[in-house]
Amino acid sequence: MKRHIAKGMNHLGNVHIIKLTDGSFVAVRRHEGAIAVLRKLFRSTPTLEEVLNVPTAFFGHTVETCFKDGSWPKIGKWPNIRKDQFRDPPTYTEDILSPGRFNILGGRDMVRGTVRDTIGLDPFVMDVDPEDFIKRIEKKVEFGIIEP
C-alpha cells in the first residue's frame, strides 16, 4: 500500500549538505519546520550512508531558498520515514513586550509558559539569511559541538 505524506511535507527526511567557508561539509535533515544539523564535520561531500548514524547536534530554522535553488544539494532521503520521528523539538520564545512571559512551541502548537518551562529547551531562532545559519553552524564547530 502506498503511503502519502501530507501536501507540503514531502521534504520530511530529506538530507542535504551545506558547504562551510573552510570547504568542509555538514549534513542536515529536514523536519516539519526545523532543520536537524548533524554532529559530524566532513572533509569531502558525504554520502547518505555516511550520515545515517550521525546524531543531531542542534536544530535550526532558515528560509527555503537554499533547498529550492540547489545551494544545499540533496543527497538522499532518510529511510523508513515515520512522521512522528520528524516532529520539531520544543523551543521557546520570550515576549519582547512582556519580559518573563514565554511561548513554548512544540511542533505546530504553542502554549504560554514561565521561565521554569523553558529549562532544557533551545530558544527558537530563525536565520532569515542562510549565511547567518552557516555562521551559527561554524560557531558550533568552533565550540566542538560538531565534531571533525
Image: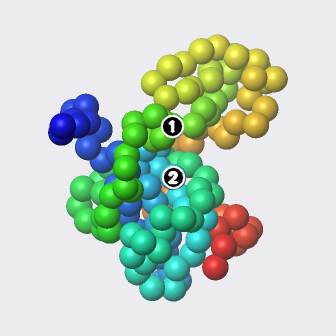
Left or right of 123? Residue 46 is left
Residue position marked by numbered label 2 in the rendering: 36
Q: Quadrant of the C terminus?
A: bottom right
Question: In the displayed image of the protein, which residue is found farthest to the front?
Answer: 1
Inspect this view and state whether residue 28 appears: yes
- Give x and y (percent) for residue 79: 37, 55
Query: Is residue 60 depicted above or below 147 in this figure?
Result: above
| Badge 2 density bin: few <14, some 14–19, many ≥20, Cα 10 Å | many
Can residue 139 be seen in this snapshot? no
Disc 2, SS: strand
For badge 2, the amino acid type reads Ala
| Image disc number at residue 88 | 1
Q: Secondary structure at mark 1?
A: loop
> Marks 1 and 2: CB-CB under 8 Å?
no
Total numbered circles? 2
How far apart are labels 1 and 2 at the CA level? Answer: 9 Å
Residue, x 45% and y 24% (percent of image)? 108
Image-quadrant location for residue 146: bottom right
**Residue at image location 73% in from the left, 70% down from the top:** 144
In the rendered view, tell whether residue 24 sits above or below residue 10. Answer: below
> Residue type at mark 1?
Asp
Give the image location of residue 30, x and y in percent. 40, 50
